[in-house]
Amino acid sequence: MVMRVKKNDTVMVISGKDKGKQGTVIDIEPKKGTVLVKGVAIATHHAKARKQGDVAGIKKQESFIDASNVMPVCTACQKPCRVGSAVLESGKKARTCKRCSEIF
């Protein structure tokens, strides 16, 4: 699956229980088509102390969400946008905002 988001991109959640939230992409799994976004899809995990010195308790951490539920936020216009591509003069490909045509 082609991923339109990369690590450290700012994204907005467009569907699901966290719709409207923005966060930074922490990790991606291209084969599964999922992303891990900071502050989004918080799951509660009850951890039991297994060894001496471990601390038991309730831990909250982000869980993976589907990549189709997030949309990258353009750095120029600060709005969620679809991603296009353009070839630069140096021959490299770059991602562009479909809304304002700026490279991000």
Image (spheres, rainbow, N blue to C red):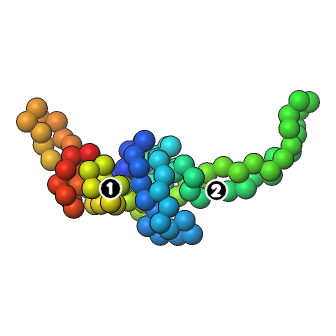
Q: Which residue is mark 1?
A: 78
Determine whether the residue tagged by mark 2 lies in a helix, strand or loop: strand
Q: Earlier in the sequence, mark 2 or mark 1?
A: 2
Work out which residue is located at the far right of the displayed protein and give it: 52
Classed neighbour count for the residue bearing mark 2: other residues with Cα under 10 Å, few (<14), some (14–19), many (≥20):
some
In the displayed structure, 14 sits above or below 34; it is below
Residue 41 horizontal/vertical position (percent):
59, 58
In the picture, the quarter occupied by the N terminus is: bottom left
Q: On the rendered structure, is 66 left or right of 56? A: left
Could you tell me which residue is drawn at 86 percent across and 34 percent down? Answer: 54
Q: Nearer the viewer, residue 21 or 47?
A: 21
Could you tell me which residue is drawn at 75 percent across and 48 percent down? Answer: 59
Q: On the rendered structure, is 84 left or right of 62? A: left
Residue 82 horizontal/vertical position (percent):
28, 60
Q: Nearer the viewer, residue 75 or 60?
A: 75
Work out which residue is located at the far left of the displayed protein and give it: 89
Determine whether the residue tagged by mark 1 lies in a helix, strand or loop: loop
**Type of amino acid under label 2:** Ile
Could you tell me which residue is drawn at 27 percent across and 56 percent down? Answer: 77
**Type of amino acid under label 1:** Gln
Q: Is residue 78 visible?
A: yes
Work out which residue is located at the far front of the displayed protein and give it: 77
Q: On the rendered structure, is 90 left or right of 74? A: left
Residue 25 horizontal/vertical position (percent):
47, 47
Specify the quadrant of the image occupied by residue 94: top left
Q: Which of pointers 2 and 1 indicates the residue nearer the eye?
A: 1
Q: Give the total of numbered labels.
A: 2
Q: Which residue is mark 2?
A: 42
Work out which residue is located at the far top of the displayed protein and give it: 53
Classed neighbour count for the residue bearing mark 1: other residues with Cα under 10 Å, few (<14), some (14–19), many (≥20):
few
